[in-house]
Amino acid sequence: MEKERFFSSAAMNWQRSEAMAAVEMNCGGGEELPAFLNINWDQSVEQSATAQLESALSSIVSSPSSSHPPPVAAESVVIRELIGRLGSICNSGEISPPSHLNTSNCSHTPLSSPPKLNLSMAEGRGGVPIPGNLFPPANFPPFAADPGFAERAARYSCFSGRNYATLPGSQFGIPETGKLSRVPSSQSLKVDVSPLEVEPRSKLTGRVSGPPTPMETELKSSQEASSVSGESNSRKRKAASKGKGKETPLSSKVAEEEDGSAKRCKLGEINRSAEKDGDVQLKTEQNDTTSNGNDNGDQKQGKESNAKPPEPPKDYIHVRARRGQATDSHSLAERVRREKISERMKFLQDLVPGCNKVTGKAVMLDEIINYVQSLQRQVEFLSMKLATVNPRLDFNDMHQNRGPLQHSFYPIESVPGAFSYAYQPQQEAPLQSVVTNNALETHCSMNPLDSGLRRSLSMQPPPSDGFADAASQLCNFWEDDLQSVVQMGFGQNQEDAFSSQNFHGSLATSHMKIEL
Amino acid sequence: MATFASIELGSSSVKKPRTGSLNQAQIKWRTGAQERIYNRRLIEALRATRAATAPGPHAVKEAADSALAITARGQSRWSRAILTSRLRRRKLLVKAGGRIRRRRRPRPPQKQDPAAVKGGRVGERLRALGKLVPGCRRLPAPTLLEEAADYVAALQMQVKTMRALADALSAATINSPAPAMEEDS
């Protein structure tokens, strides 16, 4: 896998160097070439790869010093790989300025498809003959004696050697340089292909797709490692998708998806350490995939939201393996499950006060359980309190005796809306009648709605004094649903006064005071 | 109690842009409209309870819970469970003439592997949580957590409303009943 990556990057670099071959020839170390030409190449190097390689190399080549860098030995391994890749890329390309190269062991590589590469790079390159695409599906014969290859190799060694010093991981030198070169080359090259990370995918899928992203050009060398690992990640994903056997019909879409995802992956990894598992999902990616999603419906590819741009994950079908994690379907499903659970736990954490400091599911669940228990205890306590405030009355007695006013006041007082009744002690009689009526109604019916209805209806026969109206108003206050019914039963003006209001506790009391 | 007296309610700024019912649970129970609706239902239930011939010791609590479940409009499992159990109990009461025979569930609680098994301490706690939330005993973890979130939000609103009501009523009764209250809730 790594090899492929390197090959692609090397191919890109080589392409660029080829492009620059006409422009300049800085490093002339062609002696290394023959050794590398025997390497077999991965065939699926894309036009874009080559184009990028070319651009990268061109920029890099222009910058490095003409002299060979001292650490040639260190470069040699990388160069070997690079050249190998280049071989695949450039086997069909030809180099316009024929630089002579002793490549005895190289069979003839059909470097004769510059038009392909030129197509991809022509916009930027103009008349520079670029060994063009190298064909993606074609088999690459061993790297032939490419006249420009030596130059490219040399240039590549120059720039790669130069970069080795800067890179912590030498293996990343090449892709890094590729990346570096891409920055300046973007202007010149106008590469219309996805960045380096796309290469592995494109190689796998056999085509290059994806919109160019300026962000890739911004990537710095330090992120090369992450991007490279991102490539490996994307490759893993690709492999996983391939393994599922659904890649072929969806390869195009997959490539697009993964192109986008790779870009996001890179971006995400820029912001994070390389070791961190990067979720690869961005809005644009999702939007891209939504269009493809229907087609990819069967495919078990999904995106998990990136930590940076949070997104609601499509968790029903699409699951993407994270970096460095297993990619089989079981673990993916488990991961989706686990994430659902953790999402809900986070939500609960917000609800329950004081759960922020707690980490870990078990302790948090403990807290939640305690909180629920305490809430339930509170409800019990408050219900007992309400029960004491709501004394049960003996309505029969009240009905018969027209009992002391005190008793009659209790039920009304217990009802918030009925507070106003107590203010008119002089109207005890109608109050009591109202109370008894109310009591009777409530006594008879268990259904609060029905009782309310009966109460409201029973208000009609009693004298339509203030209290009756107040009682009806109270009913209205309590049961909005009965308002229509009550309106039928009562005078319209009274209803209109109350129907538009939304009574609530004190509001009702104040209003009723005014009314009464 | 004091620790939870400061339950933060009301502001809907805590919402996360999340699909599904998780976000709605928080929003739904914290709106003033829900509080009012619940207040209304609670009062109705209280009146019904008051008028009941033999309100048991937990009548008010059950009435309050039923009111809460009604306010939930049956969209959550626990609310449906509350209403179902109340109905069942009442029917049993009526039918058996006071003697309620709680029928054990026909099958003993078996562990369904796909449903609720989660090993270790977390599993224990999940099951304990399932016992607390009505009607959520044998739910799988994500559903259970969802129900628990909704239930917690509903409980918070219930406590807030009941406390306000109890304070208002107690304030009303503290003063002498004849002149009754100046202070409103």
Image: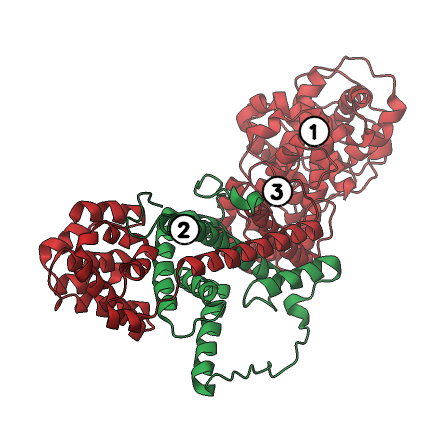
Chain bearing tag 3 is A
> For the point 74% across and 22% down, which residue is it?
A99
Q: Residue B170's mark?
A: 2
Disc 3 residue type? Gly
User: How many residues crowd around disc 1 within 10 Å: few (fewer than 14), some, or many (20 or more)?
Assistant: many
The reply to whether label 3 and label 2 mark residues of one chain is no
Q: Is residue A295 left or right of residue A81?
A: left
Question: In terms of image quadrants, where is residue A24?
Answer: top right
Q: Residue A454's mark?
A: none
Q: Colour of chain A?
A: red
What residue would you read off at disc 3?
A354
Q: How much space separates mark 2 and mark 1, taking CA atoms? A: 68 Å
Q: Is residue A273 left or right of residue A336?
A: right
> For the point 18% across and 65% down, which residue is it?
A485
Which of pointers 3 and 2 indicates the residue nearer the eye? 2
The colour mode here is: by chain
Disc 2 residue type? Ser
Q: Is residue A35 visible?
A: yes
Q: Which chain is green?
A: B
> Looking at this view, is A222 or A99 the one in front?
A222
Q: Quadrant of the N terminus of chain A?
A: top right
Q: Give the mark, 1 or 3, whose residue is nearer the N terminus.
A: 1
Tell me the SS state at disc 3: loop
What residue would you read off at disc 1?
A223
Chain bearing tag 2 is B
Which of pointers 2 and 1 indicates the residue nearer the eye? 2
Which of pointers 1 and 3 indicates the residue nearer the eye? 3
> For the point 17% across and 63% down, which residue is it?
A486
Residue B65's spot in the image, x, y percent? 46, 63
